[in-house]
Every structure is written in structure tokens, then in C-alpha cells.
Image (cartoon, rainbow, N blue to C red):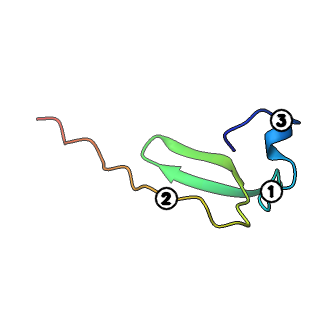
């Protein structure tokens, strides 16, 4: 969120600490659970992380 919990700069914003949504991710090394923060203001810009090059 860009600020600490209970910090004054987060008060009154439309996306201030709106909880999270659970998400399970499958990877090559197994599954793990994420808590994805809600972004009601739509300010989050997702980024795709490329796979590392295959080793020879």
C-alpha cells in the first residue's frame, strides 16, 4: 500500500486497507497460498515476471 498500517496518509483514500483475497499459485516447486490485497481504486499495475532461461 506504500505506507505502514494505521499511518495517517492512508486515511480517506478509496483503497485504504480493504482486506485481501486468497489465491493459490502452482509453481515448478509446488503450490503456495497468497493473500492478494484488494485495490478498489484500481491503482495496481500488474507486471509479468519472465521465466529464467533454461540451463544447459
Q: Nearer the viewer, residue 45 or 29?
A: 45
Q: Nearer the viewer, mark 2 or mark 1?
A: 1
Q: Say left or right for 31 vs 41.
A: left
Secondary structure beneath dot 2 equals loop
Cα separation, mark 3 vs mark 2, equals: 22 Å
Q: Nearer the viewer, residue 37 or 50?
A: 37
Secondary structure beneath dot 1 equals loop
**x%, y% of residue 7?**
84, 35
Examine the rendered structure and indicate whether residue 18 appears above or below residue 8: below
Q: Which mark is residue 46?
A: 2
- Residue tagged by mark 3? 5
Q: Nearer the viewer, residue 6 or 30?
A: 6
Q: Which mark is residue 41?
A: none
- Residue occupying the far left of the picture: 56
Where does the C terminus fall, quadrant-wise? Answer: top left
Q: Residues within 10 Å of mark 1 (few under 14, many from 20)?
A: few
Residue 55 appears in which quarter of the rendering? top left
Q: Which mark is residue 13?
A: 1
x 69%, y 44%: residue: 1
Q: Earlier in the sequence, mark 3 or mark 2?
A: 3
x 79%, y 62%: residue: 14
**x%, y% of residue 19?**
83, 54
Question: How many numbered circles does the render carry?
Answer: 3
Q: Nearer the viewer, mark 3 or mark 2?
A: 3
Cα separation, mark 2 vs mark 1, equals: 20 Å
**x%, y% of residue 15?**
77, 59
Cα separation, mark 1 vs mark 3, equals: 13 Å
Secondary structure beneath dot 3 equals loop
Amino acid at each position: 500500500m506504500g505506507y505502514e498500517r494505521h499511518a495517517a496518509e492512508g486515511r480517506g483514500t478509496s483503497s485504504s486497507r480493504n482486506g485481501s483475497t486468497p489465491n493459490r499459485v502452482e509453481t515448478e516447486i509446488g503450490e503456495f497460498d497468497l493473500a492478494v490485497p484488494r485495490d478498489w481504486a484500481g491503482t495496481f499495475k500488474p507486471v509479468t515476471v519472465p521465466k529464467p532461461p533454461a540451463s544447459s
